[in-house]
């Protein structure tokens, strides 16, 4: 089966999923650029896991369509997907090597290729000596690394990671982060789901925010941050701030050497900078404040605290 490399890796069109009276996913639509790192965000119960389960073909949409590299999602495509769920699912009593070979074969690998890939990945995480150990004998951090290896063993075209760094110490979290970025640089598309907004800002180029089963915000991270600008600048200065600055401008969060300044209506950053120079401020630093994704997340989600009326047409 041929796969298009120019089409979006995942395209979700008006997908809806219900469980009894519960609407888990309601008319969600988004398109994932090729080899992007996409942040799939939302509060608990927003519908992220239900959406992931449909993308991985664990469940099917009640209505709507999902495409993988331009093709309608089918039973073949899970062989092209690696999924690391938040609730880890290794078989505790199996040996590490035995388990990796078994999971690799489930993804269509032959034993020889699966073993070669498994040993290479174990070496990257300095886990070569764990091949003949049972999973239950490993630390939680080691188990998580083995689960990640099982997820990428078959060289998937799409990697779906749900809270991948949870429980890892900083050294191993950095190691896993480096491997994710390396895979991405080599053409693997990544869907990254987490509650840690600083990780999203660090890793993701594109985000989709879901709340009450609907996508309420999506786009490139930098575009979204600019969309939510509050037109504030941070000034770092030396000496004493002239009193005239407070007379002409709204000052926020002052410290002994920094202050945030709110632009007046119709004022630009250049206007503000010229005004500060004219008032004799000894400027050491001056930059526009972009809102963090965490601030945007809270603001956008809290704007709709209750679900909107749902259409059942």
Image (cartoon, grey):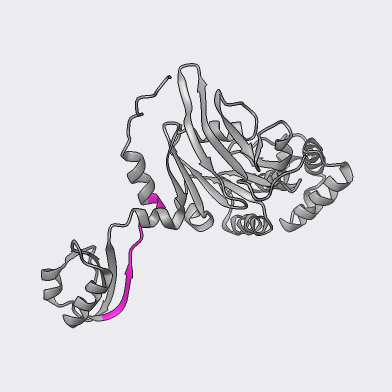
Q: Residue at x 32, y 66 (%)?
A: 288
Count of numbered labels shown in the rendering: 0
Task: Residue 37 in the image: state x and y as whole percent.
Answer: 57, 52
Q: Is residue 284 magenta?
A: yes
Residue nearer the viewer, 125 or 249: 249
Q: Is residue 92 magenta?
A: no
Q: Residue at x 67, y 48 (%)?
A: 145
Quadrant location of the C terminus in the rendered image: top left
**Res 139 seen here:** no
- Residue 202 sits above or below residue 257 on the image: above
- Residue 53 sits above or below residue 169 on the image: above
Residue nearer the viewer, 213 or 237: 213
Task: Residue 68 in the image: state x and y as whole percent.
Answer: 65, 40
Magenta stretch, residue numbers? 283-294
Q: Residue at x 72, y 31 (%)?
A: 75
**Res 87 seen here:** yes
Task: Residue 92 in the image: state x and y as whole percent.
Answer: 72, 35
Residue nearer the viewer, 120 or 306: 306
The quadrant holding residue 84 is top right
- Residue furthest out toward the right: 112
């Amino acid at each position: 089966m041929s796969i298009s490399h120019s089409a979006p890796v995942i395209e979700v069109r008006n997908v809806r999923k219900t469980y009894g009276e519960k609407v888990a996913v309601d008319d969600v639509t988004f398109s994932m650029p090729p080899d992007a790192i996409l942040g799939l965000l939302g509060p608990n119960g927003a519908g992220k896991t239900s959406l992931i389960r449909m993308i991985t073909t664990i469940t099917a949409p009640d209505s709507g369509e999902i495409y993988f590299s331009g093709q309608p999602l089918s039973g073949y495509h899970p062989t092209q997907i690696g999924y690391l769920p938040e609730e880890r699912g290794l078989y505790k009593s199996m040996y590490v090597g035995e388990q990796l070979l078994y999971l690799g074969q489930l993804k269509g690998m032959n034993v020889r290729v699966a073993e070669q890939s498994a040993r290479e990945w174990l070496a990257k995480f300095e886990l070569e000596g764990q091949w003949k150990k049972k999973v239950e004998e490993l630390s939680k951090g080691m188990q998580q690394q083995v689960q990640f290896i099982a997820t990428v063993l078959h060289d998937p075209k799409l990697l779906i990671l749900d809270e991948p760094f949870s429980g890892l110490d900083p050294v191993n979290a950095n190691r896993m982060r480096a491997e994710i970025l390396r895979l991405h640089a080599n053409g693997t598309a990544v869907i990254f789901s987490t509650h840690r907004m600083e990780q999203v800002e660090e890793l993701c180029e594109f985000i989709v925010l879901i709340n009450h089963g609907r996508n309420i915000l999506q786009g490139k991270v930098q575009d979204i941050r600019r969309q939510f600008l509050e037109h504030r600048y941070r000034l770092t200065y030396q000496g004493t701030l002239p009193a005239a600055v407070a007379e002409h401008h709204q000052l926020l969060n002052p410290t002994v050497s920094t202050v945030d300044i709110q632009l007046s209506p119709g004022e630009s950053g250049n206007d503000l900078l010229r005004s500060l120079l004219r008032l004799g401020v000894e400027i050491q630093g001056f930059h526009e404040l972009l809102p963090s994704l965490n601030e945007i997340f809270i603001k956008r989600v809290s704007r709709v605290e209750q679900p909107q009326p749902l259409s059942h047409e």
